[in-house]
Amino acid sequence: MKVLVINAGSSSLKYQLLDTDSREVLAKGLCERIGIDGKFTYKAPGKPTVDAADVAMPTHAEAIQAVLTALVDPHGGVISSMSEIEAVGHRVVHGGETFACSVKIDGKVMAALEENIPLAPLHNPANITGIKACTAVMGPNVPQVAVFDTAFHQTMPPVAYTYPLPYEYYEQDKVRRYGFHGTSHRYVTQRAADMLGKPIESLKLISCHLGNGSSIAAVSGGRSVDTSMGFTPLAGLPMGTRSGDMDAGVLEYLMNKRGMDIKEMLSVLNKKSGVLGVSGVSSDFRDLCSAAEKGDKRSELALDLFNYGVKKYIGAYAAAMGGVDAVIFTAGVGENDAQQRLAIASGLEFMGIKMDPDANNIRGKEAIISAIDSKVKVLLIPTNEELMIALDTAELA
């Protein structure tokens, strides 16, 4: 089945056309600056690349139309007509407690997405816009499926998702841990079971999605039982620009001392903190590694702080699950930075983790990077959220 995967932002739209039978990416690209001056990129194997500015995309509907036009173009296209696209899969950030799995989109689902906007006011409206744009351009008869970042973590038990606040805040306001990156964690843990040759139901896995946005998930028997992100993606590890977990008293102190309101404080926590805030150099881990190698102590501290945080979560989640069979590294940093993987694993020998430096000297390829005699396996698995979305869509369409 040919599935168009859409990830719509407020002024952008990422897309991939995948063949779910061969698992091949037929074409992919990005629509940027929608509603402004419009930039369109398109790439397909063996076809001319399109990188065009000043493309008329006043709304997401025109962006979708630009994608479809490129896909059926006689010279650069990969399909002969729009009818070859059998379904559309949408990344949707927040499903709240409403959705514990991917769903085929209908009127009731759209209403539920609208109801969950307060939980993700920056993301869900854009996702809804993308769905409506596809309906407007492709018609109501093309099946569309919503795949939620939060759904995988809906298997967490109350002890993992409940915050120690007055309970009515959960009952009335839905304040709880939701977790994110669920599609990535689900994909890599399924691949881990395949690589280990064991049923996922028998495994205790710790999935480390490490990049500009980072989260850890404890996955027991194929079910998420805990995760580091919380009510929002701001919680957990220090990230590229996000602070991660923070003493709320610090916020009150800084707001009073520096005369900031809550909007300004949240901007600091989301956009000026994390490894960028500590280093003062960059939110890009590659820049930090380069600066640390040249003797920049704050960049070195930022990397150490991040790696220390990952190490602590690995230990905590092994304790929470009563053991661990494998640790998985994925996403930008997890897939590509051998030095940080070694730093994170260093000191975890007591719990059965023993790395193989030679096997670990690899980027972006599936591999077992622990030593042969390591009791706990360490895996490098490139994530593929788009494929996961396409497979779910093919199953439900």
Image (cartoon, rainbow, N blue to C red):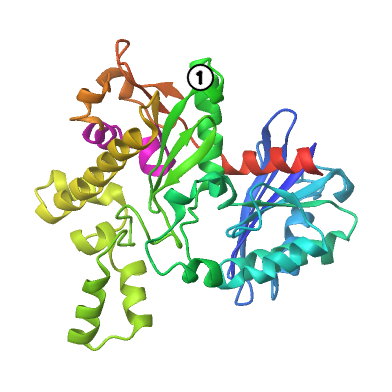
Q: Secondary structure at mark 1?
A: helix
Q: Position of residue 176 (x, y in %)?
A: 47, 61
Residue 132 left/right relative to 268: right
Image position, residue 332 (x, y; %) = 41, 43
**Res. 108 image quadrant:** bottom right
Range drawn in magenta? 328-344
Q: Is residue 338 magenta?
A: yes
Q: How many marks?
A: 1
Residue at 54% from the left image edge and 67% from the top image edge: 171
Q: Is residue 179 left or right of residue 372?
A: right
Could you tell me residue 86's position as x and y percent?
A: 84, 44
Magenta stretch, overall SS: helix
The answer to whether residue 254 is above or below residue 243 is: below
Q: Nearer the viewer, residue 109 or 127?
A: 109
Q: Is residue 312 visible?
A: yes
Q: Quarter of the image containing the C terminus?
A: top right
- The residue sitting at 53% across, 16% down in the picture is 198
Q: Can residue 78 be seen here?
A: no
Q: Is residue 280 left or right of residue 101?
A: left
At 53% from the left and 47% from the top, the residue drawn is: 153
Image spot of residue 359 (x, y percent): 33, 19
Front residue of 171/333: it is 171
Give the residue number, with chain letter if any, for mark 1. 195
**Observer-nearest of 374 and 47:** 374
| Quarter of the figure that contains the N terminus | top right
Q: Is residue 80 magenta?
A: no
Which amino acid does the dot numbered 1 rest on?
A: Met
